[in-house]
C-alpha cells in the first residue's frame, strides 16, 4: 500500500515530500506516523547530512491538519491526535540533521506548525502561512502556541492565533517567520543550495550546533551557556575538529568523517 510521503536521496541530502495533493497534503494520523518514522530513521542514517521537507504539487506545503478526521474525534481523541503532532515535532527537534522547510504553497494550521518545527524556512512567493484554528473552534495543537511566539514574538503570534488570518510570504519574511522568499520556480534549487552549503561542514559540528540551538529554546540562559560549554568540549575531542584545524593551517579543504 503506497504511503503518504516519499523520500528521495541526492548524495547526502534527503528530500521528504508530503504526498497527498488531493487533500492539499493535510496531516491525518497516517501522515503524522509516516513523517515521524521517516525523521527518526533519517536521524540515525549515517549517509544523511541534511533534510528538506516540502509538499507535493504547487498549491500546498501542508494546508493543515485533516479536519475531516478531527470532526468526529472526542476530547480525549483530540488530545491523542495532538500528542501525535507533538511526537513529530519532538522528532524533528531532536533529529541531529538540519531540516529545511521548502514552503511551496499553503502552510496553515498543522502545516504552519510543521514548518515551525524545521530549523530553517524558505518560502515561495506564492506561499501563505497562518494558524486559522480559531475559525473552526479549536486552537493550535501541534506546537503553534509555543513555537510561533518564540520565533516571531508574542504580539505577532497573538494576532495570528487570535484572528486566524493568513499572512503572505513577504509578511512572513518581515516578521522572521521565514528566512527568505524566492520565486516559485527557484524554491527547491534555493533549498538544495542551502542544504549543500551545510553539507560541506563537519557533521559532528552541525549536530552539536543544532543541539545547542535547541537548548537555547528550552533552557534559561545560564543553563544554555553551560550546555554550550559542555558541547564545546565534546566537539573539541572529535576527529573533525583535528582535521578542520589541520586543513585550515595547511590551507586545504577538510575531509570530514563525522567522528
Image (tube, grey):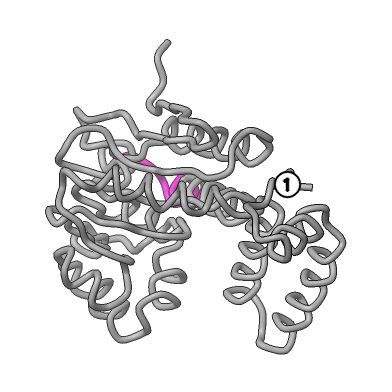
Farthest front residue?
250
Pick the residue in front: 232 or 218: 232
- Circle 1 residue: 258
Q: Secondary structure at mark 1?
A: loop
**Is residue 42 covered in magenta?**
no
Q: Is residue 86 left or right of residue 69?
A: right
Q: Is residue 38 above or below residue 142?
A: above
Residue at image coords 70%, 80%: 224
**Region rendered in magenta:** 72-79
Pick the residue in front: 191 or 217: 191
Q: Is residue 230 left or right of residue 39?
A: right
Q: Is residue 167 left or right of residue 254?
A: left
In the rendered image, the quadrant that contains the N terminus is top left
Position in image of residue 185 (x %, y %): 16, 43
Residue at image coords 67%, 52%: 254
Q: Is residue 177 left or right of residue 77?
A: left
**Is residue 76 covered in magenta?**
yes
Residue at image coords 28%, 48%: 64
The overriding secondary structure of the stretch rendered in magenta is: helix
Q: Quadrant of residue 62?
A: top left
Q: Quadrant of residue 6?
A: top left
Pick the residue in front: 74 or 240: 240
Position in image of residue 160 (x %, y %): 24, 73
Amino acid at each position: 500500500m503506497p504511503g503518504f510521503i516519499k523520500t528521495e536521496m541526492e548524495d547526502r541530502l534527503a528530500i521528504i515530500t508530503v504526498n497527498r495533493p488531493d487533500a492539499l497534503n493535510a496531516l491525518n494520523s497516517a501522515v503524522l506516523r509516516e513523517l515521524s518514522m521517516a525523521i527518526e530513521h533519517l536521524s540515525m542514517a549515517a549517509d544523511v547530512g541534511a533534510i528538506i521537507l516540502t509538499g507535493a504539487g504547487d498549491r500546498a506545503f501542508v494546508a493543515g491538519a485533516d479536519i475531516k478526521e478531527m470532526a468526529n474525534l472526542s476530547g480525549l481523541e483530540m488530545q491523542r491526535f495532538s500528542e501525535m503532532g507533538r511526537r513529530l515535532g519532538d522528532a524533528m527537534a531532536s533529529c541531529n540533521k538540519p531540516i529545511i522547510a521548502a514552503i511551496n504553497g499553503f502552510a496553515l494550521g498543522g502545516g504552519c506548525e510543521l514548518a515551525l518545527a524545521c530549523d530553517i524556512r524558505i518560502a515561495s512567493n506564492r506561499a501563505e502561512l497562518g494558524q486559522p484554528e480559531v475559525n473552526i473552534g479549536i486552537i493550535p495543537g501541534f506546537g503553534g502556541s509555543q513555537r510561533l511566539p518564540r520565533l516571531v514574538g508574542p504580539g505577532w503570534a497573538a494576532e495570528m492565533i487570535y484572528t486566524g488570518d493568513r499572512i503572505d510570504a513577504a509578511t512572513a519574511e518581515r516578521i522572521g517567520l521565514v528566512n527568505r522568499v524566492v520565486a516559485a520556480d527557484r524554491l527547491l534549487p534555493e533549498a538544495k543550495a542551502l542544504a549543500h552549503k551545510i553539507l560541506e561542514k563537519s557533521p559532528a559540528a552541525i549536530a552539536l550546533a543544532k543541539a545547542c540551538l535547541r537548548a537555547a529554546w528550552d533552557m534559561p540562559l545560564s543553563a544554555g551557556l553551560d550546555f554550550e560549554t559542555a558541547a564545546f568540549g565534546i566537539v573539541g575531542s572529535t576527529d573533525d575538529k583535528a582535521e578542520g584545524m589541520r586543513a585550515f593551517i595547511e590551507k586545504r579543504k577538510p575531509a570530514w568523517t563525522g567522528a
